[in-house]
Amino acid sequence: MKTLCLRGTVFSGKGEGAKYMKLPWVKKQMREKLGFVPYPGTLNVRISPESVAVKKTLAEEKAIGILPAAGFQRGKCYRASLKTEHRCALIVPEVAGYPENVIEIIGPENLRKKFHLSDGETVEVRVTP
C-alpha cells in the first residue's frame, strides 16, 4: 500500500470513542498491534468528498483487525501519522450506518491538546503501509 492522505476538519464527537478506548481488551490489542496504549479518546475528523473516495480504497488494503469482546462491533485500524509524522492510527468502526465522511484518529496522547486543535481546523492524516 502506498501512503494515502485524508484531509478534513476537526469536530467534537459524542465521547463514544473515549468509552471504547478505555476498555481493557481494546488497550491490550492496541498495545500489541500498534505498539502504544491509546489515549482514552479519539480525534474526530469530518473528511472532504475527495478524501471519502480515498477512504473507500482502504477497504482493499490489509488492515489491522480489532477483535471485539462479546457484545461489541468489529473494527479495523491502519497505521497513520498526523502533523510532523506523529505516530497514530486511523480507526474504522464496522458499525452499520457509520458516516462515510468521518474518521477517528487515536494516539498515545490527547492529539487535540498536543497539536492545539480546535473544532473547524483542517488536518491531514497520512495512512501508511
Image (cartoon, rainbow, N blue to C red):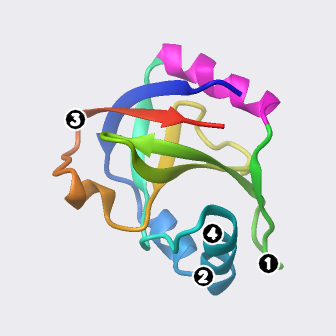
Gap in angstroms between the C-alphas marked 4 and 1? 14 Å
Residue 120 placement (x, y as % from top left): 22, 35
User: Helix or strand or loop: what does disc 4 sit on?
Assistant: helix
Whichever of callouts 2 and 4 sits on the residue coming sooner in the sequence is 2
Q: Give the numbered dot on residue 30.
A: 4
Q: Which residue is drawn at 61% across and 17% down?
A: 53
The residues colored magenta run 49-61
Task: Please tell me whether mark 4 or mark 3 is closer to you in this view.
Answer: 4
Name the residue furthest top.
Answer: 50
User: Helix or strand or loop: what does disc 1 sit on?
Assistant: loop
11 on left or right of 76: left
User: Helix or strand or loop: what does disc 2 sit on?
Assistant: loop
Q: Residue at x 62, y 62 (%)?
A: 34
Q: Give the numbered dot on residue 23.
A: 2
Circle 1 crowding by C-alpha within 10 Å: few under 14, some 14–19, many from 20: few
Q: Residue at x 57, y 22 (%)?
A: 52
Is there CB contact under 8 Å for labels 1 and 2? yes
108 on left or right of 64: left
